[in-house]
Amino acid sequence: MHWKPYILKGVVLGGAMVFVSSLLQAQTNQPLVLADVNGFNDTELYPPGNLQLVTDGGARWEPAPGTPAQIVPLVGDSHGQVLRRVQTGTDNMDFLHFPPVSDGTLTVSLEARASTAATRTLDVFLLPDNGGETCLLGWGTVSNQLAYYDGSQWRAVRHLDTNWHHVEMISYLSGPRFGTWDLKVDGSLLATNLPWRNHHPPNKAYNRLRLGGIRGVTGSYADVDNLVITAEGATGAPEVFYLTNISVLTNEFRLSFETQTNAEYCIEYTRALTNEVWSPLAIVPGSGLVAWFTNETATNAARFYRVKKLPPPGYADGYRGIWFTLGQFSSYGDKYSGGLGTYTANHIPLAIYAPQVNKTFFTYGGTLKDKRHLLIMVSEYDHATGQVPRPTLVLDKHGVNDPHDNASLALDDQGFLWVFVSGRAAARPGWIFRSRTPYSSASFDFIRQDEMTYPQPRHIPGFGFFTLFTKYTAGRELYWMTSSNGVTWSPHRKLAGIGGHYQVSNVRADGLVATFFNRHPGGNVDKRTDIYYAQTADYGATWTTAAGVPLVLPLTTTNNPARIFDLASEGKLMYTCDLNFDTNGHPVLLYIVSRHYQPGPGGDPREWTVARWNGTQWLTSVVCTSDHNYDMGSLYILPDKWLIIGPTQVGPQPWQTGGEMALWTSVDQGQTWTMTRQLTANSLYNHTYARRPLNAQDPFFAFWADGQPTQFSPSRLYFGDSSGSNVWRLPYEMTAPLATPTPLN
C-alpha cells in the first residue's frame, strides 16, 4: 500500500527491457499552494453571475447543478467580487477540486460573512478523492453560532455575527495528530484536535472542497472571498528518476540511479509485463548519491526491471510483533500481556494457505523496533523456496497501541487478498483493504470503513463474503454482513445480544457457517460464561442449533435453544479458542474453562476442553490444564487424528499469558488426549496465541508470537509444522528482499 506509484520509462538494450521510476517525496518548508482564487477578481475566470465550470491554475470549479453559487460584485466594499452561496431550502453544493495531497498539513483559508446569524447559511467541507467528508464547519447550523460537526452532532465554537471574518481549517493528514483538525478565526486559535467526521486511512489523497447551501432559509446567503488552500510537509509533484550507465553483457546487467537519503529502493524484475508478480533482486539504501546495481545472473532473454521506493526504513525491515499490557493488575500480574501479534482468538483467520501458488499468506500486529504503536502487517511464506519477503505495511494505526485492532484475512475466488482491520466501537471504525494483484501481499488498496470489531471474514465460493463481527451496541454484541464483491455490503444483522459475547467461527466446505460464543452477564467481560452454538446453511437467511432446531434472532435471552452448556450455574468461566469440523461435518469446539478471571492459582483448574457434536448430543473431554486464562491454542482435525497446538506448558514467566508450546494428539475423536511433543523449551519469553491457518499446510501449520508478559520486551514471530518437531522464527531484522526463517530445532 505504501509503495509510491510509478511513472514508467523504457529502454531496450541487448534484449533487456528496462523500466524504472518512483515518486520522490520532495519535502519543503514553504507552503505548497494548491488553490488560490485571487479574490475572485479575475472577471475572465469569474464573470458576474452563475459560477462557471472553470479551471483556475491547478484548481477546478464544479458548480452545483441545481442552483450554482453566484459571483457578485460588492459595490463600495473592499472585497470587490465575492462568491455568494444562496440558500434555496434544498441542498446545493459547489466543489473546488485541487491537486491531491496525502500527508502533511492541509489548510483551507477563507474570509466569510453570513447574511443572518440566526439560521444556517454556509457549510464548508474537506473531502478526499473518494469517501465521506472529514472536517465540517457550519455558519448558523447552531443558531447564532459558528459550529463544527464531530460525527454525531453539531457543536458550537464561537458566537456568530454578520461581519467578515478570516477562517482557517487546518487538517492533519499524517503524523501524531493524524485524523484531527484545528480551527482559527481572525488569527486566534479557537479549537484544537477536533475530530474528523469520517476517518480515512493514512496516505489517502485529499483533493476536494465543498461549499454547501444546505437546507437553509430561502433567500439567506453567505459570501466567501480570498479562498486559498495550502499544504505543508506534503509530498510534492512527481519527480521522475531515470536509469543511467546501463550496460548489458552476456550474463550481466548493470544500471545506476539517483537516490535520496533515509530512503530504500527495491530492484525487481519480471520476464513479461503480463506477470502480476515481480521478483525482488536487491534492496539498495539511499544516500543522496547515485547508486549502482549489477545483476550477475541476467540472460539474453527479455527481462523487465523496475525500481521501487520502499516505505520508510524500519516499517518493513523485519518481523516484529506488538507488545501489549491490558493494565489490569492483581497479585499475580496483569490479566493478560506480552507478545500479542497473533491476538485475539476472535480475529479469524490470521493466515490462509493458497494451493494455487503454494504460499501461506498471514497478517499480524506489528510495531517498530523498541516501540509499541500498532502496525497492521501482511506477508507470505513461499512453501517452494522456504522464504519470506519483507512484510508489507498495510496500515499504521497512529496513536493506537492496542492489538485488539489486529486484522483478519480472506482470499477470494480470483486470488485477491482481503485485510479486515478491527476497529474499537464507532469512534474507531474498522477498515477493509484488498491486494492490488492476486496472490500477492506486496501492496493494498483501501476499500471501505465500517463499524466492525473482531472481524471474522470468509469468502465462500459461489456466494461471496460472509463476515461475522462485533459491535458495541449494548455491550459486545454479535452481527454479520454479506457481500458479493467486498465493496458493497448488506446491512448489519444482529445475531446475539445477551449482555455481550466473544465468539469464534468457521465455515464448512459446503458453505455452512458456524459460531460458538459465551455471554457476559450484565455486560461484564470478567464474568464470561455459558456456551452457545449457532449455524446457518443458507448464508444467514435462517439459523439453527447443531440439531437443526430453528433459532429466532437476535438471541436476547439467557436460556435459549442455542445454549449448549450452562456454566454459570457451576461458577465457571469460558474462554474461546477454536472451532473446527470432524470428518462427518459435525462441529468441534475448543475452549478453556476457568474458575476466576484473575491470573494465579485462584482460577485453577484451567481446563482445555473439547466439545464435539456426535449427531445427537454434545460430548466433552478435558485435554489438559494450563496456568492462565489466555493460553490460547488451535484445533486441527485430520483424517486419522485430531491435534491441538497451544502454550499448555509452564513457560519462563509462570502464571502469565502464554507458556511453552506443545502438541497434543487424539486418535479417538477427542475422547482422550496425549502430549506427543513440546515444540518450544527453555525459552526466553512466553509463547502466546497459537493460530491455525485456513487450509493449514506444513511447515506453516501453526503461527504465534512470544514476549515477556511482566515487562516491555521485543516480540518475535514463529511458525511450526504438524509433527511438532520443527519450529522456525521469522527474521526480526532483514537487510535483503527475501530471507529464510531460522530453524530452532
Image (spheres, grey):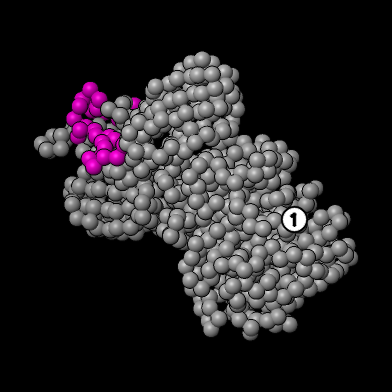
Pinpoint residue 727: horizontal percent, then vertical percent.
Answer: 66, 56
Q: Is residue 223 left or right of residue 615?
A: left
Left or right of 543? Residue 376 is left
Give the residue drawn at x 56%, y 33%. Answer: 279
| 150 vs 741, nearest the viewer | 741
- In the rendered image, which quarter is residue 388 located in? top right
Residue 156 drawn above or below residue 377: below
Of residues 389 and 425, the one nearer the viewer is 389
Q: Nearer the viewer, residue 573 or 708?
A: 708
Q: Is residue 274 above or below residue 552?
A: above
- Which quadrant is the C terminus positioned in? bottom right
Is residue 515 something that shows in the picture? no
Q: Is residue 331 visible?
A: yes
Magenta stretch: residue 49 in it? yes
Q: Residue at x 53, y 68 (%)?
A: 708
Q: Is residue 20 above or below residue 28?
A: above
Find the magenta span and give its range.
25-53
Picture coordinates of residue 262 (x, y %)?
36, 43
Q: Nearer the viewer, residue 450 or 591?
A: 591
Name the spot of residue 400 as percent of width and height, x first.
45, 59
Callout 1 environment at 10 Å: few (<14), some (14 to 19), or many (20+)?
some
- At 34% from the left edge and 49% from the top edge, which residue is drawn? 172
Whether residue 618 sits left or right of residue 389 in the image: it is right
> Which residue has dot 1 on it?
722
* Residue 681 found in image quarter: bottom right
Say which residue appears at 25% left-offset and 48% top-offset.
168
- Numbered label tally: 1
What amino acid is found at the position of numbered circle 1 in the picture? Ser
Residue 429 lies within the magenta run? no
